[in-house]
């Protein structure tokens, strides 16, 4: 059986089938029963809140404050007036029982999130379903699943919700198999943080193919799953597992080695951060810095914008954890394509070309000013880069710089100048204006995901555009080369922070261009470092000259592949 591999490695263990969740089956109610159902909802919500508070303490003790914060956000949403009013409206208008109203409310919110173009935001729909399940169990007075995991457990279910994760002893988990989600789903993120294999298998019928305690093998490299395999298959899988483990041990020997080419040219290998847990991974893999700190997760934790204190706490934690290395934090990048539940926005025909990123923040200047204040406070602890998203002209940069100066004045700022101002280069306009942009910023970072879709007029979230969305398109690579060349001339820090930054095939191209830093998932840093340390900088420079003359994506890929193959770097 095959699925989508979202976390690498190979492991075997005993199947452990997750509780599928509380089922809801109730008839419609009469007008006279509405008050009684609201009472049931409020009492059930109180029980759910008590269970969540217990869960928060368990998580804080076993996993740390950063993981507990996820459930503190759940608790705030669960007990919010928005949820109460939403459920009340469904009970009154649709004449359904409390548990059905909670299910409808959670499902409606989850679907709204899943219809968004941004993958990270789509995956957050799962959080609403999790909160809905907690409410339903509270209303029905169902106790949380407290079964004990067997040793070497491979956890399997429709999905793995945050609350299910927290209730399990994850030290016993050797693999994850779920039917729903993607690379940014909760299950995938947890698997990568635990370094265990995980597969998404939407076609798998658990009832037909698996039962508790079956022996299963999970291959997070090929995406394959075996249930009760024969001895010959087991022996083959064990050999592959041993080989991967040996390769992993070899990579760990590179932890303290510098991120540089064979002839000593440095290329910073930075980490992406999409949650507080990623900060720990950046430290663990000794990232040279944080190249893309996505602040959106802070704005999705609760049903209101994060306070100045909360933002300062998280940003400062990242800066202190990195111990003087650069921490580049992107200003809130949201819009109609990835709206926040408490910021209703008008629907747009093409949200990627609408009010998003800095354009939206200018409409909500109080939010922008709070974020600037928090970044200033965090910069007391070390170097912080404030990165502006969705730049198409010079005016937004000048306006943000003016706001920074205003906030400094209001704070009576006398601290060292640790706050750098930079922009994400993700529009063709920014590429064309790069010389002028570099005159007024401290750094630039190229967001290859959006740059590719804007450059090629190909929506990266549209499956039918797969043949047109191509990060190796010569127009994209030539645009990247132009930006990096101009940044080098002006001695400005430059980097790459899209998916392409973590692609080993693109590494020699970026090295030869003279890119200062590449920002990728922390778990990919050592793999990139191994290849980087075998590349000769001069040879990579010569390669770039060839690549920029090749007129097709296919030709570019073939040349990059040959470069790595000739040096035995495709293992």
Image (cartoon, rainbow, N blue to C red):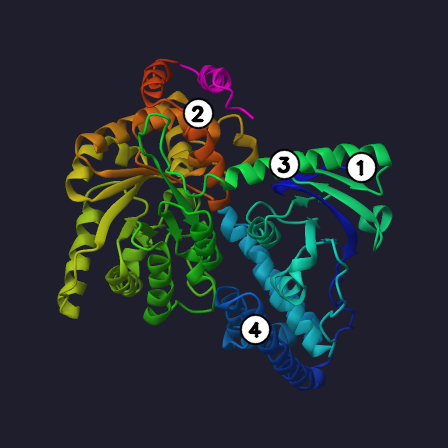
The N terminus, quarter of image: top right
Q: State the extent of the magenta-drawn residues as a range.
A: 551-571
The residue labelled by disc 4 is 56
Residue 338: % across, % down? 46, 52
Numbered tag placed on residue 244 in the rendering: 3
Counting residues from the start of the chain, the first of labels 3 and 2 encountered is 3
- Asked which secondary structure carries label 1, the reply is helix
The residue labelled by disc 2 is 472
In this rendering, position of residue 343 left or right of residue 221: left
Determine whether label 4 and label 1 are within 8 Å by CB.
no
Quadrant in which residue 111 is drawn: bottom right
The residue labelled by disc 1 is 234
- Asked which secondary structure carries label 2, the reply is loop
Residue 179: % across, % down? 70, 48
Q: Residue at x 29, y 58 (%)?
A: 363
- Principal secondary structure, stretch drawn in magenta: helix
């Amino acid at each position: 059986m095959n699925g989508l591999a979202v976390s690498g490695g190979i492991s075997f263990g005993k199947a452990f089938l997750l509780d599928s969740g509380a089922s809801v089956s109730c008839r419609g109610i009469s007008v006279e029963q509405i008050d009684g159902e609201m009472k049931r909802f409020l009492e059930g919500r109180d029980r759910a809140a008590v269970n969540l508070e217990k869960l928060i303490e368990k998580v804080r003790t076993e996993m740390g404050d950063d993981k507990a914060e996820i459930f503190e956000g759940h608790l705030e949403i669960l007990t919010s007036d928005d949820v109460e009013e939403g459920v009340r409206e469904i009970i009154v208008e649709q004449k359904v029982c409390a548990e059905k109203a909670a299910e409808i409310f959670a499902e409606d919110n989850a679907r709204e999130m899943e219809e968004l173009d941004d993958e990270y935001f789509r995956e957050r729909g799962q959080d609403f379903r999790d909160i809905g399940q907690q409410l339903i169990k509270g209303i029905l007075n169902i106790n949380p699943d407290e079964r004990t995991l067997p040793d070497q457990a491979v956890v399997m279910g429709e999905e793995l919700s945050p609350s299910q994760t927290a209730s399990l002893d994850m030290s016993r988990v050797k693999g994850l198999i779920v039917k729903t989600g993607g690379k940014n789903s909760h299950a995938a993120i947890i698997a990568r943080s635990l370094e265990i294999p995980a597969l998404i298998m939407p076609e798998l019928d658990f009832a037909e193919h698996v039962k508790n305690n079956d022996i299963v093998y999970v291959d997070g490299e090929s995406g394959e799953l075996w249930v009760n395999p024969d001895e010959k298959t087991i022996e083959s899988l064990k050999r592959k597992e041993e080989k991967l483990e040996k390769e992993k041990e070899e990579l760990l020997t590179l932890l303290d080695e510098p991120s540089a080419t064979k002839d000593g040219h440095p290329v910073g290998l930075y980490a992406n951060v999409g949650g507080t847990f990623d900060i720990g991974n950046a430290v663990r893999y000794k990232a040279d810095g944080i190249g893309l700190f996505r602040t959106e997760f802070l704005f999705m934790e609760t049903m209101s914008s994060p306070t100045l204190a909360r933002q300062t706490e998280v940003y400062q934690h990242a800066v202190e954890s990195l111990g003087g290395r650069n921490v580049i934090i992107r200003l809130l990048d949201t819009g109609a394509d990835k709206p926040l539940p408490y910021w209703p926005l008008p629907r747009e025909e093409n949200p990627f070309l609408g009010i998003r990123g800095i354009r939206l923040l200018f409409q909500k200047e109080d939010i922008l000013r709070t974020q600037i204040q928090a970044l200033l406070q965090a910069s007391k602890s070390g170097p912080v880069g404030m990165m502006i998203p969705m730049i198409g002209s010079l005016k937004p940069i000048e306006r943000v710089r003016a706001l920074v100066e205003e906030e400094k004045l209001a704070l009576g700022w006398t601290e060292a100048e640790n706050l750098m101002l930079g922009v994400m280069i993700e529009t063709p306009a920014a590429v064309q204006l790069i010389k002028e942009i570099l005159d007024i910023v401290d750094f630039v970072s190229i967001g290859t995901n959006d740059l590719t879709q804007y450059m090629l007029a190909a929506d990266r979230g549209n499956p039918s555009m797969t043949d047109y969305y191509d990060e190796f398109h010569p127009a994209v690579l030539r645009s990247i080369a132009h930006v990096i060349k101009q940044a080098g001339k002006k001695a400005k820090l430059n980097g790459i922070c899209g998916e392409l930054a973590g692609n080993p095939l693109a590494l020699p191209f970026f090295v030869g261009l003279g890119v200062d830093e590449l920002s990728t998932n922390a778990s990919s840093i050592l793999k990139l470092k191994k290849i980087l340390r075998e590349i000769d900088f001069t040879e990579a420079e010569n390669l770039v000259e060839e690549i920029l003359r090749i007129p097709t994506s296919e030709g570019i890929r073939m040349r990059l592949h040959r470069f790595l193959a000739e040096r035995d770097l495709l293992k």
